[in-house]
Amino acid sequence: MTIWDKISAIDRRWIYLAMAISIFIPTIVVIRFPVEITVESRQLYDAVESLPDSSVVMLTFDYYPSTLAETEPMSIAALRQLFRKNMKVVTISHIPLGGPSIAERVTRQIAEEFGKVYGIDYVNLGYKANYVAVMHGLASSIEAIFPSDWSGTPLKEIPMMQTIKCYRDIKFIFSVSDNATIDYWISIVNAQYGVPVGGGVTAVSAPKMYSFVEAGQLTGLLGGMKGAAEYEKLVGVEGTATRGMDAQSLAHFLIIALVIIGNIGFFATKHRQG
Amino acid sequence: MKTTIPLIVAFLSGIVLIFAFFFNPDRVFIGAAQEVVLQWMTIISGFALVLGVVSILRVNSAKVKRREAGWHYKLATVISVLVMAIPAILPVSSKTFGGKIFYTVFPENSASLFGTGTGSIYDWLFNYVDSPMMETMFAMLAFYIASAAYRAFRARNAEATLLLLTATIVMMWRVPIGEAFLRLFSTQLPDYINMFLMNGFNVAVQRGIIIGAALGAAAMSLRIILGIERTYMGKG
Amino acid sequence: MRHLLNAASRIASLTAIFGLALADSALAQDFGEEAFIAERTVMVVVIILFASAILVFTRWAKQGKSLFVRKIPGIDAIEEAVGRATEMGKPVLFIPGISDVDEIETIAGISILGRVAAIVATYEAPLMVPTRYPMVLAACQEAVEQAYIEVGKADAFNKDSVRYVAGEQFAFTATVNGMMMRDRPAANIYMGGFFAESLLLAETGNAAGSIQIAGTARPEQLPFFVAACDFTLMGEELYAASSYLAKEPLMLGGLKGQDFFKMLIIISIVFGTALTTFGAGEWFKEIFNVP
């Protein structure tokens, strides 16, 4: 076996090892290149900024714990922007496994930073099965779908919810999602009820979402950890996404290097075989 | 008969729900009918869960009994199912009928351990066992993507070359170091990538696939509703 | 009890397919006093046109008109892959996606499974079908059992070849990956709705040395299958696969009807784009604005 054969067929375990090292290095050495803002992230940020102070915004936690690295920094940055502008935040989740408890944990943590009070400045509605029916139901009455919040307190007893009855009272929906629920926020809530929807999704789902941004159905888009890092920069507080950019940069460059090496081996072998 | 009745039910259910789309549910009986049908679906899904639990327990315990290769992993599966499920379905209050019986045997202050609420066994297992395992599995994508890209992105022909060049450009553009590198060639380059690759070619392709798939799904639904396609119920 | 549950799950799945989305969208909206929702008339026209196209082509197919359907290499490869499994004495692994039966992709996957199971039964190759949802389990068991009965191999059917694995996405993935590495299937067939696990499954299957054929309508997962599988069915090919495998004129008629309707959509897009480019497209856009 020649060197060319070897580099065109590297054992996958070496590749895994190289990837592990490339992710590990940034934990020791910080490189920190500046994060550039894309048009889609700017559009989302501006849309939220343009809302009058104290508007009601629905923030969705439609993600599983598996994608926390990409999605949670988006929620955190969004909450910082919303609380800074004194918005009233209603959180909701369509994910039974973990969604509402992530919403609870993250929202409380950021609310404490800004001195916000539960029930006055924010409410966690929690989870309800059958998301398509829930999205439609919220159009006529939030209370009919969620008679109580995540902790079981009746909405009647929550001061903030006295003036928030349905989509008419919500100025913007900020959807953070790692699955197809964002498609429904767009096709049902935006298309049929006219509420502006913006959002963040995992890097894998982002290419599909561009068509909705282009069509004006999605007001801005954050794609994966890079999108989250951009939003952190816009909001002005660096978080885990910005710190993760070094590891992601090295990982991407490793893949590019592997592709180049593979092709060198491929052409050299092909050339030798005539 | 075994196929005919479900086919009739299927046809009627489909027709009712399609018609319901065009009529005001508050004014026409069809609105109420569709709600009943949708409730049925939720109830039946709940019952069907029993099938899943029975299947997982039967298949794995049979392997444990026969001491097949790797039987101890099957045993771990059976134990995990029981440990996760049983505390979650136990009553959380002595006010219910089941709770009254249960808490005559067990102390009532253990109630917080049961159910799925904060502080329960289920909640603890979910947060500290299940959730990290999910994250680990998702993180493995980084490793798999590297080996798949290394193997698949070979410039075998013109199309494959185009694919690997596009992938390389997008990978560079999506990270700060790559973006800085691209700006060495032109300060506008990252913006052009976003404009032409992502908002141009990408959007066109995505829409093409989505429209095609939606049509395929609609045609398949129609074939099923009319009884032309029956393979899903075991008839060719 | 089992038959009752099977029948019930069938009814529920069919209910879901035939218009869950449509039905849901009529709930909780305020349409005033009118009984018929006039704003949705355009949808009536679209449904009638689409259904007519399918039925006309199906009728032509019944009458014996020859209908050309292009070759789909991924589907042609299925029989080859099953043959290879038989020669090697190794199983065929079929995953009908990880969505529940209320997704039409899952139903497409189960339909293909029915066809594949018939081939597998004919060749007498072992079959493994892991499922993520109990309703999918019931439907798959029924489809596979019937396929074995139809090719006269009822005795060879093993109920546990179709089994429930786990409801959680990555627990399902980990278990199936384990099956791939331990049993080394000769062929892995992925047909249905897949999400983040697509590459985890396909890459493990590749490492296990299996022939891999995938099909999904989810554009975001297609690149992963293309990179790691030998053949990939994209978008509508997934829905066409069952008809294509059936090789019956009746089923192929449906595909031609679909193509005809797609031509209408392409014409509408070109026409609409031209009108909008010249600033006269507002009325045209309004036609398709359905609440």
Image (cartoon, coloured by chain):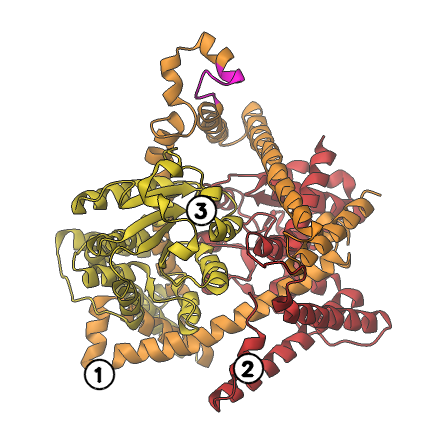
Taking depth in this image into account, of A140 and B130 the one nearest to the observer is A140
Residue A125: image location, x then y, percent? 39, 42
Residue B96 among those drawn in magenta: yes
Instruction: Tell me, yes or no, whether the two marked residues, 1 and 2, touch with CB atoms within 8 Å.
Output: no
Q: Quadrant of residue C252?
A: bottom right
Residue neighbourhood size for the residue with mark 2, other residues' Cα within 10 Å, grouped as few (<14), some (14–19), many (≥20) = few
Residue at the spot of label 1: B186
Residue at the extreme bottom: C278
Could you tell me which secondary element the residue under label 1 belongs to?
A: loop
Q: Chain of mark 2?
A: C
* SS class, disc 2: helix
Give the left or right position of residue B27, taking residue B201 as reference. right
Subunit under mark 1: B
Query: Which residue type carries mark 2?
Result: Trp
Give me the residue at 69% from left, 35% from top.
Answer: C5
Inspect the image, locate mark 1, and give the three-letter code of the amino acid beneath it.
Ser
Where are the magenta residues, as a range?
A: B90-99
- Is residue C265 in sight in this rendering? yes
Q: Residue at x 36, y 72 (%)?
A: A263
Quadrant of the rendered structure where residue C4 is? top right
Badge 3 is on which residue?
A: A142
The secondary structure type at the circle numbered 3 is helix
Q: Residue furthest top?
A: B104
In the rendered image, what is the letter of the chain coloured orange? Answer: B
B55 to C226, vertically: above or below: above
